[in-house]
Image (cartoon, grey):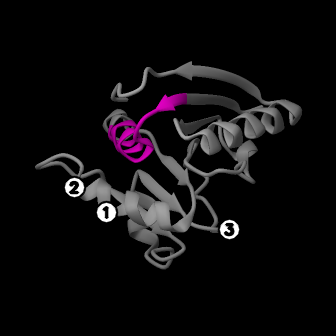
């Protein structure tokens, strides 16, 4: 079963995701990121600009799915809708307000939960769904304002 870690108390989920993805990229991991299309568009831009002189290599699916060579070489995959995630992505990150449909495809899923009461309630519901499905669920509390 998939290990699902909920990172809660995140003041700025987009910035937190950028830092988490930079760390994953530096460690050599392949990561798929799930979220609402508009949020993934913002993340796409942020991965180019969140730190001066840095860039986190990423690709957006399904937009870039036709570039097979680049898809095979890119460590971070932003997944919009029901796009097929490369099997090499063994870690998932969720910025979505709903459970990731293919959670069992990952060894580990990190669910980022912001401070907004709506985000927290959606996180609680996802926790219950993942737990009911038999996944190992854990909690990582971050103090408000603390970087990833």
Query: In the image, which residues are magenta?
Result: 8-22
Above-or-below relation of 6 to 45? above
Judged from this view, the residue extending furthest toward the left is 53
Residue corresponding to mark 3: 82
Tag 2 secondary structure = helix
Residue corresponding to mark 1: 45
Upstream in sequence: badge 1 or badge 3: 1
Q: Mark on residue 49?
A: 2
Q: What is the spatial separation of the Cα atoms under label 1 and label 2, in whole angstroms?
A: 7 Å
Q: Mark on residue 133?
A: none
140 lies left or right of 15:
right
Q: Residues within 10 Å of mark 2 (few under 14, many from 20)?
A: some
Q: Given contact means CB atoms under 8 Å apart, are the residues at marks 1 and 2 in contact?
A: yes
Tag 1 secondary structure = helix
Q: Residues within 10 Å of mark 1 (few under 14, many from 20)?
A: few
* Residue 68 placement (x, y as % from top left): 46, 72
* Residue 9 placement (x, y as % from top left): 50, 28
Say how many tags the image has.
3
* Of residues 139 and 108, the one drawn nearer to the viewer in this rendering: 139
Q: What is the spatial separation of the Cα atoms under label 1 and label 3, in whole angstroms?
A: 21 Å
Upstream in sequence: badge 3 or badge 2: 2
């Amino acid at each position: 079963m998939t290990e699902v870690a909920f990172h809660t108390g995140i003041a700025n989920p987009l910035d937190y995701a950028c830092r988490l993805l930079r760390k994953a990229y530096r460690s050599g991991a392949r990561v798929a990121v799930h979220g609402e299309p508009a949020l993934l568009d913002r993340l796409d831009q942020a991965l180019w600009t969140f730190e001066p002189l840095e860039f986190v290599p990423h690709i957006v699916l399904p937009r870039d799915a036709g570039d097979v060579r680049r898809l095979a070489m890119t460590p971070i995959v932003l997944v919009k809708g029901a796009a097929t995630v490369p099997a090499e992505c063994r870690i998932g990150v969720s910025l979505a307000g709903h459970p990731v449909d293919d959670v069992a495809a990952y060894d580990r899923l990190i669910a980022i939960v912001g401070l907004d009461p709506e985000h927290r309630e959606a996180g609680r519901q996802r926790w219950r769904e993942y737990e009911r499905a038999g996944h190992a669920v854990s909690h990582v509390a971050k103090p408000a304002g603390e970087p990833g």
